[in-house]
Amino acid sequence: MLSRGQDNALVRYGLGTEYLKLQQYKHAIMHLQKALEFDAKYSAAWKLLGKALAGAGQTAEAIAAYEQGIHAAEAKGDVQAAKEMRVFLKRLKP
């Protein structure tokens, strides 16, 4: 889709999701960050970005992503996503 000029938050989220499944964290992070450039309120992308960063051993960045994701989710009323990210955040903090 990217090669055909179709670039948007959903396409990047889908690519990030697939790379995360393959544990290719660098690629997942890149696509999820791009998804968030398209839509900074995309709470599902924040959640996966946190997972990808944590998987890559970038704990501080994962914590920051979850914190931003919680804020974005709460701002749009996405209670479930905020709740899930709080759980992941708690696991990362010492």
Image (cartoon, grey):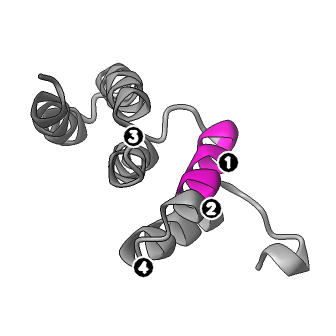
Residue lying at 23% horizontally and 41% vertically, measured from the top left: 81
Q: Does the magenta stretch include residue 34?
A: yes
Q: Which amino acid does label 2 sit on?
A: Arg
> Which of the two discs, 1 and 4, sits closer to the camera?
4
Q: Toward the viewer: 57 or 43?
A: 57
Inter-mark Cα distance, 3 to 1: 14 Å
Q: Position of residue 2 (x, y in %)?
A: 80, 73
- Chain-order first, disc 3 or disc 1: 1
Figure check: 39 above or below 60: below
**SS label for mark 1:** helix
**SS label for mark 4:** loop
Residue picked out by circle 4: 22
Residue lying at 33% horizontally and 46% vertically, measured from the top left: 54
Residue lying at 11% horizontally and 29% vertically, measured from the top left: 90
Residue picked out by circle 2: 12
Q: What residue type is labelled 1?
A: Lys
Q: Toward the viewer: 68 or 22?
A: 22
Q: Which amino acid does label 4 sit on?
A: Leu
Q: Which mark is residue 34?
A: 1
Q: Is residue 51 magenta?
A: no
Mark 3 surroundings within 10 Å by alpha-carbon count, few (fewer than 14), some (14 through 19), many (20 or more): many
Inter-mark Cα distance, 4 to 2: 15 Å
User: What's the magenta region?
Assistant: 29-38
- Chain-order first, disc 4 or disc 2: 2
> Which of the two discs, 4 and 2, sits closer to the camera?
4
- Chain-order first, disc 2 or disc 3: 2
Q: Which mark is residue 58?
A: none
Q: Which amino acid does label 3 sit on?
A: Ser
